[in-house]
């Protein structure tokens, strides 16, 4: 026991939900605690890391804690496959192997576990990536919420592709492979019973074939990112920050499905910060932009690909600006914290 | 609503704690649900899998859910590093990279998170394996118990070593690199406040240098396994099963520290089924057994290496037998389920 005054309570004394949201709080936590542990060159925070001694291979890890486990368009099993494949793809890599680790709550119905595992296996087979190893832990009731899934993937890089969040350049076209906001609003609506889930489905899907399609453009493909946690706003801000460039986006060009817009209106959400699991942003040299759009549109998952903006030749490094429908300009901030917990 | 009779309640309707214990229930769950999803050749269930197209590389994944987070001799961070390094080492591989994924409960004190992450980083540096990528998820209070850690590792195989749980042969010497039972009894005693924790510490440590030391013996090293969940009993039963051989062990040769024996007596546990995190079992061709013991003992972590038994030239395939101190023989069963939940 001590008679000393308690130290003042700071918000930062404990982990907050927002620390896991992929926004500024996450970045602060990573900078302060986690990154000092990571080795190697960490100029740009990429979705996947090079494997030391094997520059053609990349590795990426992700834990999935989505609630509910099943939602229109997907489930925690298929999401865990797609999410890690996509992180590899954003480094210009084809997935060659996945590991799967399950943490299961005692008492989970075996039928539910079977559904998750079967969906996971089906998604892996459809993406033609083998699940080569796994781990299963069971913890007591209340120690985990039903089931969490970690997937870690290894990918083989396309020889010609070297995309990095640090390689966007003035003049680049900013391309988006499909509409935004579907995954986050679908999961939220399903969890909270808001009713939108009859109109929208998650966009969860693998994106590596889109990257295959871009491969012939080689080094013209400067940056790739899938706008998951923190949405398009976070993805664009990360590339602007890591490449030291400005990014200008046209609001009228960003495809937001009507039901997503309605859900976001009701919930007071900005579709730009809602998580996606089935689209990518590409920063491409201007000479290759049209070819890149054609390549993306050649596949069903990129059929709605559009050009949403560009990297201006001048402008504040690190700043993302949106030209609104009425012609005004507003800064698109890096989202601070969690608007939508347990979306992935 | 339905008026039909409820289906009869089977024990197997829900996931049980024992399904994650590394014993027979785990094997049943894996066989029925998880293995059909895994691809490739699954004759023997190994600690790490070959990476397709890269036969010199192996991959292994493990989620750590130990409670408490800190215990004499280790913590969840260092354990997560050691555990995955050791799974790679048991395939004859040196670790070349780790990924780390954290699932954190909202409200966890940042000081505690810092302790875990720093311990993890220190363990990785000491083992000279870089942490190349990571992921952080935060979930609401009650959705996870404080913090769980997944580590996935990639290892480069020693050219000469090709150990497999399926390669034990009649005549093999069975070697054990150190005393058993320390990790499981330490964690349990700390969690339950049994008082033994002042006398024992976890053996958590990396084992890859022991494997380096065995490398010159090349193909004489038939099988390697670290007896974690399910203890020595599970490790020996797995090798006996996958190699279709019998295994004979001398009780008098198995080193059980006095405090471990006392704790097991009190708790009604068999030291053979208690988890270890810092010793390995090696099945070695008889001509190389003495050299292997010398090699293991040349390192501090193998100083107490001993020969504990052999593979008899005849005997029931898959059966592990213990010659007791009084000269009797008893079958060492594959443990059924969980005696010690959340030990790793």
Image (tube, coloured by chain):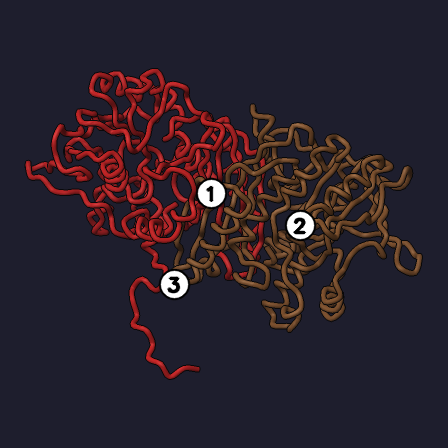
Chain colours: A brown, B red
Q: Is residue A202 above or below residue A121?
A: below
Instruction: Check chain identity for marks 3 and 2: say if they share one.
Output: yes
Q: Could you say where residue B81 lies in the image, as x and y percent from the top left?
A: 46, 36
Disc 1 sits on a residue from what chain? A
In the picture of the structure, the residue carrying the numbered disc 2 is: A22
Q: Is residue A170 above or below residue B265?
A: above
- Which type of secondary structure does the marked residue at label 1 adopt? strand
Quadrant the N terminus of chain B occupies: bottom left
Q: For the view shown, which residue lies furthest in the front direction?
A: A298
Q: CA distance from mark 1 to mark 3?
A: 26 Å
Q: Which mark is residue B267?
A: none
> For residue B274, what is the image quadrant?
top left
Q: Is residue B178 left or right of residue A114?
A: left
Q: Could you say where residue B110 lies in the image, as x and y percent from the top left?
A: 58, 49
Q: Could you say where residue B35 lies in the image, as x and y percent from the top left?
A: 38, 47
Quadrant the C terminus of chain B occupies: top left
Q: Residues within 10 Å of mark 2 (few under 14, many from 20)?
A: many
**Residue A338 shows in this picture:** yes
In the picture of the structure, the residue carrying the numbered disc 3 is: A107
In the picture of the structure, the residue carrying the numbered disc 1 is: A131
Q: Is residue B69 above or below residue A158?
A: below
């Amino acid at each position: 026991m001590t008679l000393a005054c308690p130290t003042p309570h700071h918000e930062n004394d404990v982990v907050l939900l927002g620390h896991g949201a992929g926004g500024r709080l996450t970045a602060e936590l990573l900078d302060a605690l986690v990154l000092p542990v990571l080795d190697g060159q960490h100029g740009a925070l990429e979705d996947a890391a090079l494997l030391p001694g094997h520059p053609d291979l990349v590795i990426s890890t992700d834990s999935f804690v989505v609630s509910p486990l099943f939602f229109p368009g997907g489930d925690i099993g298929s999401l865990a496959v797609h999410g890690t494949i996509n992180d590899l793809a954003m480094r210009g890599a084809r997935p060659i192997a996945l590991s799967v680790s399950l943490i299961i709550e005692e008492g989970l119905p075996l039928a539910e576990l079977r559904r998750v595992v079967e969906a996971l296996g089906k998604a892996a087979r459809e993406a033609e990536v083998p699940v080569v190893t796994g781990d299963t832990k069971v913890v007591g009731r209340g120690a985990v919420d039903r089931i969490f899934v970690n997937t870690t993937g290894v990918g083989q890089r396309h020889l010609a592709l070297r995309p990095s969040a640090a390689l966007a350049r003035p003049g680049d076209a900013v391309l988006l492979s499909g509409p935004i906001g579907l995954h986050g609003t679908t999961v939220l609506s399903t969890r909270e019973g808001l009713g939108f889930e009859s109109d929208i489905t998650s966009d969860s899907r693998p994106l590596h074939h889109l990257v295959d399609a871009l491969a012939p453009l080689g080094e013209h493909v400067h940056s790739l990112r899938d706008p998951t946690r923190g949405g398009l706003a976070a993805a664009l801000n990360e590339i602007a920050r890591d490449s030291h460039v400005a990014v200008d986006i046209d609001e009228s060009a960003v495809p937001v499905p009507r039901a997503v817009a309605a859900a976001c209106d009701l919930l007071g959400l900005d579709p730009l910060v809602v998580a996606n699991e089935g689209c990518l942003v590409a920063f491409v040299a201007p000479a290759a932009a049209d070819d890149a759009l054609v390549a993306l549109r050649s596949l069903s998952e990129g059929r709605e690909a559009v050009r949403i903006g560009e990297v201006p030749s001048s402008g504040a490094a690190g700043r993302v600006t949106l030209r609104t429908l009425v012609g005004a300009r507003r800064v698109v901030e890096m989202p601070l914290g969690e608007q939508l917990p347990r979306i992935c």
